[in-house]
Image (cartoon, helix red, strand yellow):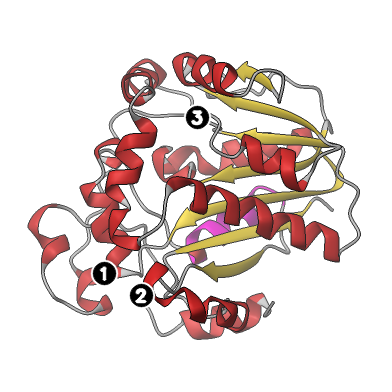
Amino acid sequence: MTTTAQAASCSAYYPEESDIRISGEEARRPYGIRAMVAQTSTQTRPSRFGHMKLGPARAEFDNFAKDYRSLHAANIRISGESPEHFAEYKVRDISALTGNDGEQVSRILDFGAGIGASVPYFRRYFPQARLTCVDISEISLKLAESRFPGEAKFQFFDGRTLPFSDQRFDLIFAACVFHHVDHAEHVSLLRELNRVLKHQGRLAIFEHNPLNPLTVYTVNACPFDKNSKLVTARVMRARFAAAGFPDARVMYRIFFPHILRALRPLEAQLTWLPLGAQYFITAKKL
């Protein structure tokens, strides 16, 4: 793994100062990264996940719950991989990270768990841990519980206050959740995650990288990403710091599609390069 300083140094070549959303035909024009970023808008999500307008957001996620897996599979077909591939690599990465640091993980929170895509991989890579899944979509949670009965605790979240006591979890995980959240709510939600995280516990958030043109195209073509707004790693890292995680590390992931999978061992040497399809930010609670 490379350092955050290395990532920041390389990222300085790219205009990351604002949140990014490329819309309409602009996403399909054959421009380079700089041109794509220059043409972005900063329209905020009309249906907020956080403190306000939760009803419309919940309805949106409820409407897609039953078809989420098939829609996701169709959307990422160009990668040559299944939704399960992307769900597993995230949990595997965090398992390797916590294992390398000798962390004891007994309680895990999957924040924005949806239909439970990550559940079987938490059971595989953290078999002794107690898993709790939260989401604002009750239909998604019911579907997740029917898919994986007895594998986790599934609990509704009102979008504002997590229904848990302080310092409850050793590990909090969010897989491509925050681009669905009103960006004005990011810091408050990160502070809420900080509250329920144990001292020296780890927060890990994966997001789509808006500096990758294929990612931008894919997100814009995805039905359940219609109202989302991508966020750069630099901006998200600053929000980590504002929420009480000053030592966050950024790592970029997913550089090679299935057809080039033989090259994937090289990805461990590329985590500093801000061109991966996704990135993750991780930090411990001090």
Q: Quadrant of residue 209?
A: bottom left
Q: Amino acid at mark 1?
A: Val
Q: Quadrant of the N terminus?
A: bottom right
Does residue 230 belong to the magenta stretch? no
Q: Quadrant of residue 216?
A: bottom left
Residue 38 left/right relative to 270: left
Residue at (17%, 53%) from the top-left corner? 23
260 shown above or below 221: below
6 shown above or below 175: below
Per the rendering, the mark at residue 37 is 1
Q: CA distance from mark 1 to mark 3?
A: 30 Å
Q: Earlier in the sequence, mark 2 or mark 1?
A: 2
Q: Are marks 2 and 1 in contact (CB under 8 Å)?
A: yes
User: What SS does tag 3 mark?
Assistant: loop
**Toward the viewer: 167 or 258?**
258
Q: Which residues are magenta?
A: 234-244
- x and y percent of residue 60 in the render? 32, 23
Q: Are marks 1 and 3 in contact (CB under 8 Å)?
A: no
